[in-house]
């Protein structure tokens, strides 16, 4: 579809230049000569029709390119507006260009039009590739003493419906604080499901959650370390990822939460990510404030019944953050 | 065939200097009033700080990276690639700050230098525009310069207007075929102010090629002198920075520390633009990337429309604009195009001539032409107003850098 779009745009651009000149001359004839010549108007109508025929498919394909897909890609009406304004401007400029006495006007027009085309086509090309990038949703489940009273409620509600997970999204799962690695420290985390396509990962996640039926949450909740672990696991993967934590509090035995440290690790490893934290159960105000500041998106669920829908919403929504670079960071 | 420049060798412009100076002074006075009464109030209200210094509020006297020129003046250059905010910046403005009386605070010294440079720029740029245009321009058009994309920046303290002052003198001295020491001096001073002077090289290259073709020895000599001065002084500064830092390559290393991926590859800028559009909800980022592409491309289209006296002028400006687009795309850096573009006199010329051409007195020869002209002229003015608002609001918010 993209190659057709590029082809249509290039052809349209070239034909527009010719047609705009013809339209201009016809309008001139109709307006300036004050003629009521039927043939002039007829020709004008035909030309306008041809113009529309050329641009309508372009507009349709552009719409197809820009409309939100089932993969939850964002809608960018702003960008569509910019494109329309540029095209309108180009059309008007071409008409006015007709009256500018420039020597070598064709050569000049080709240089300017080619530069504009490279930019527009480049943007369209990359839009396609950027949005087709794989995105990983990495679920980090708290099975520490933080979830002592909630884990049995949370575990069966980590439900994912394969058909509702967008195609380009990979999913992974890690559990921290469960004491399953034989340690009872702040670095207790195990990856049960490596990030993979939904067809592989979702059945594995369900099996894992069933196996966790027997565990008793008692370990330390080293959220900071768990996130470092998750970011390390996302290294080398394409896209802007979502690290999704389900917890019920903060374990201060494992130190303070430090977002800058996590960001620094992400920058070092080249991992762009959005941190989403969902808390379930009772949580005190201080912890809520701290988690709100720590996460890019924070949500507290008063009712654990809402957890499956929340998970599904997150998987279906694109990352809200994208750090192009950290030029504005304070030293 | 490209038409031959008709400038007289060594001739002096015969315009109403007093009027041009008066309108330039009035424009600067208006800018000071706007800075004090509007911009200062808005920025104070926003309570934001300059980049890298949480305790230094954004101030109209030294917004964005101007603070680093001040620090270089106060503390001297810190010759270390690990202190990029010092050696990123070329020295002339910091040296000039230290030449002014110490009783004036550093930021006000910078602002005064910037205003003086803007005053000089308005005069020289107007002469330059007169020189390249077949249209008769009235000096009151100078009032419109702050309205052009990026032009509102002259109300604040920055290095761009000092750079523009020298680049416009450079351009004017080349096309007026002044004595060769002029392009040598103005080119050197421009590059000592900001690396943006490099945009002049392709423009001067076009003049050089044309002069070669037309066997115009003086024009060739002047354009080569301009290119030579910019290139050599830049290289000398780079070597000097490396020498003082005791580290060969410190100048470039410091630029890489900016974490802008300079070597991300050709066209990766477009990919990054799309990522920003797709993933970021930061309005500032959207506008930064959009304006970085729109401003130079828009200038190219306007350049295609405005009447110019000699075609070589059109191609010289086009060469610089293409370099600007290429630099943005290849270096993968959208930063401050709205401001950087003001260091190139061709940008100001295009804006002024376009407004004059589209909204000047209409001719009765062609209704369609007049309608389209007015449509484009009003559209351009609206865009200018939007970009002025973008500058005023976006500067303290770090939208374009």
Image: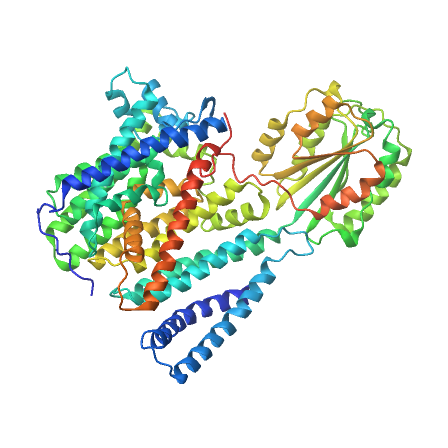
**Which image quadrant for residue B379?**
bottom left
Is B310 on the left-hand or right-hand side of A167? left
Q: Residue at x 27, y 20 (%)?
A: B98
Tally of numbered discs = 0
Percent coordinates x, y for residue B57 in the rendering = 45, 24
Give above or below for B343 relative to A106: above
Out of A288 and A11, give the one closest to the viewer. Answer: A288
Q: At 18% from the left edge and 47% from the top edge, which residue is drawn?
A: B223
**Along the horizontal axis of the image, is B319 left or right of B128?**
right
Residue B232 in sight from this viewpoint: no
Q: In this image, B366 relative to B254: left or right? A: left
Instruction: Identify the residue shown where x is 85% and y is 24%.
Output: A218
Q: Is residue A22 above or below residue A179?
A: below
Percent across and percent down for residue B380 are 38, 52
Q: Position of residue B311 (x, y in %)?
A: 22, 59
Residue found at the very far top of the displayed protein: B103
| Residue A227 seen in this snapshot | yes
For the N terminus of chain A, which image quadrant? bottom right
In this view, the residue farthest toward the right is A214
Residue A140 x %, y %: 75, 35
> Does residue B380 sit above or below A237 in this rendering?
below
């Amino acid at each position: 579809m993209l190659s057709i779009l590029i082809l249509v745009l290039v052809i349209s651009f070239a034909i527009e230049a010719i047609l705009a000149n013809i339209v201009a001359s016809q309008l001139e004839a109709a307006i300036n000569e004050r003629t009521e010549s039927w043939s002039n108007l007829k020709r004008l109508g035909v030309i306008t029709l041809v113009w529309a025929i050329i641009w309508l498919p372009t507009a349709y394909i552009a719409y197809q390119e820009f409309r939100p897909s089932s993969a939850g890609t964002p809608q960018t009406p702003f960008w569509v507006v910019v494109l329309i304004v540029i095209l309108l401007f180009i059309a008007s400029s071409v008409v006015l260009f007709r009256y500018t006495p420039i020597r070598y006007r064709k050569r000049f027009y080709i240089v300017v039009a080619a530069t504009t085309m490279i930019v527009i086509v480049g943007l369209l090309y990359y839009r396609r590739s950027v949005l087709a990038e794989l995105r990983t949703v990495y679920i980090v489940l708290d099975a520490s003493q933080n979830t002592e009273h909630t884990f049995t409620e949370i575990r069966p509600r980590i439900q994912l419906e394969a058909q509702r997970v967008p195609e380009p999204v990979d999913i992974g799962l890690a559990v921290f604080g469960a004491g399953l690695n034989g340690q009872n420290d702040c670095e207790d985390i195990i990856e049960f499901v490596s990030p993979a396509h939904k067809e592989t990962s979702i059945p594995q996640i369900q099996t894992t959650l069933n196996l966790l039926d027997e565990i008793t949450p008692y370990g330390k909740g080293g959220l900071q370390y768990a996130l470092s672990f998750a970011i390390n696991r996302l290294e080398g993967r394409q896209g802007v990822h979502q690290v999704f934590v389900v917890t019920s509090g903060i374990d201060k035995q494992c130190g303070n939460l430090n977002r800058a440290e996590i960001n620094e690790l992400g920058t070092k490893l080249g991992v762009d990510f959005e941190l989403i934290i969902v808390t379930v159960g009772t949580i005190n105000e201080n912890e809520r404030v701290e988690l709100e500041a720590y996460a890019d998106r924070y949500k507290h669920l008063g009712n654990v019944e809402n957890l499956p829908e929340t998970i599904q919403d997150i998987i279906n929504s694109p990352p809200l953050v994208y750090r192009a670079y950290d030029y504005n960071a304070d030293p | 065939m490209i038409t031959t420049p008709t400038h007289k060798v060594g001739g002096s412009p015969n315009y109403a200097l007093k009027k041009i100076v008066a309108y330039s002074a009035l424009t600067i006075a208006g800018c000071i009033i706007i800075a004090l009464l509007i911009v200062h109030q808005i920025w104070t209200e926003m309570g934001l700080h300059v980049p890298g210094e949480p305790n230094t509020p954004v101030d109209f006297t030294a917004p964005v990276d101007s603070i680093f020129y001040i620090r270089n003046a106060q503390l001297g250059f810190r010759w270390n690639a690990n202190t990029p905010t010092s050696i990123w910046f070329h020295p002339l403005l910091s040296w000039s700050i230290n030449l002014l009386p110490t009783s004036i605070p550093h930021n006000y010294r910078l602002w005064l230098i910037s205003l003086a440079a803007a005053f000089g720029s308005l005069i020289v740029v107007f002469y330059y525009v007169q020189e390249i245009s077949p249209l008769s321009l009235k000096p009151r058009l100078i009032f419109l310069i702050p309205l052009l994309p990026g032009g509102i920046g002259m109300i604040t303290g920055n290095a761009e207007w000092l750079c523009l002052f020298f680049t416009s003198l450079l351009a004017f001295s080349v096309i007026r075929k002044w004595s060769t020491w002029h392009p040598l001096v103005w080119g050197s001073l421009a590059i000592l102010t900001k690396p943006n002077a490099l945009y002049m090289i392709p423009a001067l290259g076009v003049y050089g090629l044309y002069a070669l073709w037309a066997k115009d020895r003086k024009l060739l000599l002047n354009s080569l002198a301009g290119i030579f001065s910019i290139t050599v002084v830049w290289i000398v500064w780079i070597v000097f920075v490396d020498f003082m830092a005791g580290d060969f390559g410190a100048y470039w290393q410091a630029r890489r520390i900016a974490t802008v991926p300079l070597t991300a590859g050709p066209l990766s800028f477009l990919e990054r633009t799309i990522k920003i559009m797709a993933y970021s909800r930061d309005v500032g980022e959207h506008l930064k990337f959009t304006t970085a592409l729109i401003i130079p491309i828009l200038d190219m289209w306007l350049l295609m429309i405005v009447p110019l006296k000699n075609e070589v002028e059109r191609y010289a400006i086009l060469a610089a604009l293409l370099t600007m687009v290429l630099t943005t795309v290849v270096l993968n850096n959208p930063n401050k195009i709205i401001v950087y573009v003001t260091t190139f006199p061709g940008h100001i010329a295009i804006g002024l001539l376009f407004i004059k051409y589209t909204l000047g007195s209409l001719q009765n020869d062609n209704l369609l032409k007049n309608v389209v002209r007015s449509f484009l002229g009003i559209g351009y003015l609206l865009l200018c107003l939007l970009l002025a608002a973008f500058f005023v609001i976006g500067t303290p918010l770090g939208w374009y850098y």
